[in-house]
Every structure is written in structure tokens, then in C-alpha cells.
Image (cartoon, grey):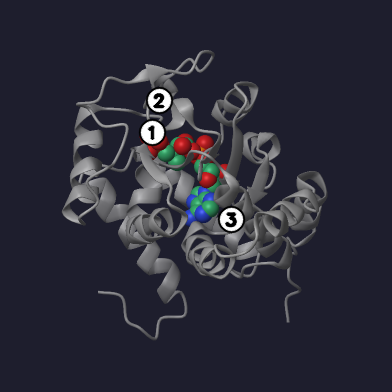
Amino acid sequence: MIPKNHPRYQSLLLRDKVKNAFKEGYLADSGMIAHGRGETFDYLLGEQTTTPAKEAMKASVCKLLLAENPVLSVNGNTTALVIDEIIDLAKELNAKIEINLFYRTEERVNIITKMFKDRGYEDILGGNTEELLNIDGIKNPRSTASPEGIYKSDVVLVPLEDGDRAEILVEHGKEIITIDLNPLSRTAQMSTITIVDNIVRAIPFMIQTTKEYKNKDKKELKLIVDNFNNKENLKKSLNEFKIKEIK
Ligand code: PTJ
């Protein structure tokens, strides 16, 4: 039991979620390492959502609202940290959710599928009973793609991963939005839009933004997307990392 007055209460709560997810069998062991890496970057950001991250999220929401077949890809860490919020975001955006694991095992996929279904979300894609296709070029189990989801998607949210999937999906004509606290990760560099923020703050912000934007004129959404430059925004995000002075 973490005392509420502990100075690192929020951070320890997230660690607990990650540890429990590992014990429950759906978070990869490497997922705990990934979480630790994320914590470090978040510490340096002051554990706050920055202005460039907000700009990236606004552009992302516009892109997802303008998409024909938007998909939110979920892995073990995303499920552990924000399963309820991802379901809310998918509903607000009218997007699909697909399970896509780097360390794919039947058992992990079954547990995550059940977690979504237990929350009343029946249409979860990427499960074990589905006939999955493969995205050429990705030489790992993460290449699976649901024919109704990532395979025919035009815009995909791919949070929390550092690898080659984003660039291969981009090569296949898809627009990729990532949430990654590390602005230097390969995924952050290769994505169409990079949100440098903690996923636990980012998804609620995106839900709120979707509610505000979803009745806007398409032209207005397109203008926000057109005025967004990911390279420039990534540079601004990198400048937000400050080593604080010791008092
Ligand atoms: O569930 P699986 O099998 O798909 O595996 C998932 C992990 C996360 C283990 C796998 O994709 C992996 O190994 O990821 P990496 O290469 O460690 O990349 C994870 C990225 O997410 C790193 O750049 C971290 O800084 C970042 N990250 C970690 N926690 C958060 C985060 N970004 C945003 N919010 C976080 N809470």
C-alpha cells in the first residue's frame, strides 16, 4: 500500500500497475524496462505535458478525425496504463482498437482480449481467433495486422515502442502517430506525428481535444494538420528536457 502523501505517489502507482500487469501475465518482462526508461524521460520533463506535446496532440486528433479507417494499436504497457482511456478515445474518435504485441504469445493476447471484452468492448481486433495478415518487411511477430484494422488503416496510433514498425508502416502508405517520452527513439523520429508525453497524460488530453474538435469543419481540421511540422515540433520537444539546478 503506497501512502498518499508519498512525494512520488503518482509515479509509484504507475509502477504498481506495470508490476501487477506483469504478474497477471500480459505485460512483457521487457515492458518493465521500457517503463523505467519512460520514467527517466518524464522526470526530466518535470512530469508535465509540454506545449509542443499539446500541439502534436491537437494535430493528431485532427488527423484521426479526418481518417477513413483510424486504428489505435495497443501493446502490454498501453493496456496496463490506460485501457479504459483508450476505449473512451476509440469511441470518441470512432476508431478501432487492435492488439499488436512485439513479444506476441497466445496467452498474452488472450488475457488482453478478455480485458477489453470484460469492459464491454467486444470489437477488439488482432486477437487469436482472427485470420491475421502480415505487413511485409517487419521481421517479427509485430507484423500481424487485422484485415479490418491496421492492414487497411490509413492512420494508426502506435504508442510506446522503439523499433522499425513505424517506418515500415509509413513505407506502406500509412500515417503513424506515436506517443513516446523519448524524442530520440527510432519510432519518434520516423512517425508522421510524435507526441513526446507520458501516455497517462496524453490519452485524457486527446479525449478532451476530440470532444472539442469533432464537430469542427473538416477544412478547419485540415488547416491544423497542414500547419503542423513534426520535425520542428520534435526539436521543440527536445528543448523541453532540462536538467534542473540543484538548490
Ligand atoms: O507488449 P509488447 O510485447 O508489444 O512490448 C511492449 C514493449 C514496450 C516492451 C516494447 O514495445 C519495447 O521494447 O519498447 P521499447 O523499445 O522499450 O520502447 C518503448 C518506448 O516507450 C521507449 O522509448 C520509452 O521511453 C517509451 N515509454 C515508456 N513508458 C512510457 C513511454 N512513453 C510514453 N509514456 C509512457 N508511460
- Which of discs 2 and 1 lies nearer the camera? The answer is 2
Q: Is residue 60 above or below residue 186?
A: below
Residue at x-position 19% and y-position 48%: 117
Q: Is residue 194 above or below residue 1?
A: above
The residue beneath circle 3 is 61
**Nearer to me, 239 or 123:** 123
Residue at x-position 51% and y-position 68%: 211
**Nearer to me, 181 or 190:** 190
Give the side of residue 12 with respect to residue 171, left or right.
left
Q: Give the CA distance from mark 3 to mark 2.
A: 22 Å
Residue at x-position 68% and y-position 34%: 190
The residue beneath circle 2 is 145
Q: Does mark 1 have its CB less than 8 Å from ligand 1?
A: yes
**Residue 134 image-quadrant placement:** top left
Amino acid type at image mark 2: Ala
The residue beneath circle 1 is 100
**Residue 143 image-quadrant placement:** top left
Residue 58 tag number:
none
Q: Quadrant of the N terminus?
A: bottom left
Q: Can the viewer see residue 100 in this picture?
A: yes
Amino acid type at image mark 3: Val
Say which element carries label 1: loop
Amino acid type at image mark 1: Asn
Say which element carries label 3: helix
Q: Position of residue 31 (x, y in %)?
A: 40, 43
